[in-house]
């Protein structure tokens, strides 16, 4: 079920911006941990991962072994992997055609950190889903930053 909003702690928002700026012009990436309440995805932690893409300037690839290890760590608690994040060093906060092509999981949050040429980072949230005929799409989600 598509949530109405995504919540993120201000400290995690700052950490994501630092990751994006530190890796630019390459893309950074990682996993989002949290849980879904009735209509909100609450992100409780961000986990940076190495970008394994062969072209880090135009794409990202999260190490599946890191993901499996994180899933094992979360198995006994209330939180789970609820999404991923990556940066767009070109400053575009919208999912790219490549993002849509490579998106595999439905009902998954994507945070995109758009880095512009002067060091500002714009954050956007997207919900990846599939239609009845298996067509993938992203829809924008509002983000609430918690202090």
Image (cartoon, helix red, strand yellow):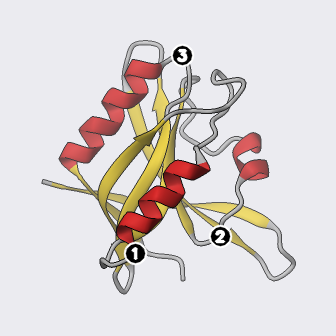
Q: Is residue 132 at all visible to an observer of this figure?
A: yes
Residue 43: x, y in percent? Answer: 33, 62
Q: Which residue was labeled with disc 2? A: 106
N-terminal-most mark, 1 or 3: 3
Question: Residue 78 vs residue 1: left or right?
Answer: left
* Residue nearer the viewer, 33 or 58: 33
Residue 29 percent location from the top left of the image = 50, 39
Name the N-terminal-most of marks 2 and 3.
3
List the residue tagged with mark 1: 75
Which callout, 1 or 3, points to the residue nearer the camera? Answer: 1
Q: Residues within 10 Å of mark 1 (few under 14, many from 20)?
A: few
Distance between mark 2 and mark 1 Cα atoms: 20 Å
Report, in whole angstroms, how far the alpha carbon at label 1 lies from the one at label 3.
Answer: 35 Å
Residue placed at 46% from the left, 75% from the top?
Answer: 3
Q: Secondary structure at mark 3?
A: loop
Q: Is residue 19 above or below residue 86?
A: above
Q: Residue at x 40, y 75 (%)?
A: 75
Which is more toward the observer, 24 or 3?
A: 24
Residue indicated by mark 3? 25
Q: Residues within 10 Å of mark 3 (few under 14, many from 20)?
A: some
From what the image shows, is residue 11 above or below residue 17? below
Residue occupying the far right of the picture: 133
For label 2, count other residues whose C-alpha is less than 10 Å away and answer few (under 14), some (14-19) or many (20+): some
């Amino acid at each position: 079920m598509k949530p109405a909003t995504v919540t993120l702690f201000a400290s995690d928002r700052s950490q994501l911006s630092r990751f994006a700026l530190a890796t630019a012009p390459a893309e950074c990436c990682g996993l989002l941990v949290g849980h879904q309440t009735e209509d909100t995805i609450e992100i409780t932690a961000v986990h940076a991962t190495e970008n394994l893409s062969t072209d880090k300037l135009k794409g990202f690839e999260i190490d599946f072994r890191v993901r499996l290890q994180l899933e094992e760590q979360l198995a006994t608690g209330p939180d789970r992997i609820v999404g991923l994040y990556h940066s767009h060093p070109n400053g575009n906060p919208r999912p790219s055609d490549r993002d849509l092509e490579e998106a595999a999981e439905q009902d998954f949050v994507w945070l995109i950190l758009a880095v512009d040429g002067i060091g500002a980072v714009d954050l956007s949230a997207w919900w990846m889903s599939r239609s009845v005929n298996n067509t993938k799409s992203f829809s924008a989600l509002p983000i609430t930053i918690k202090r």
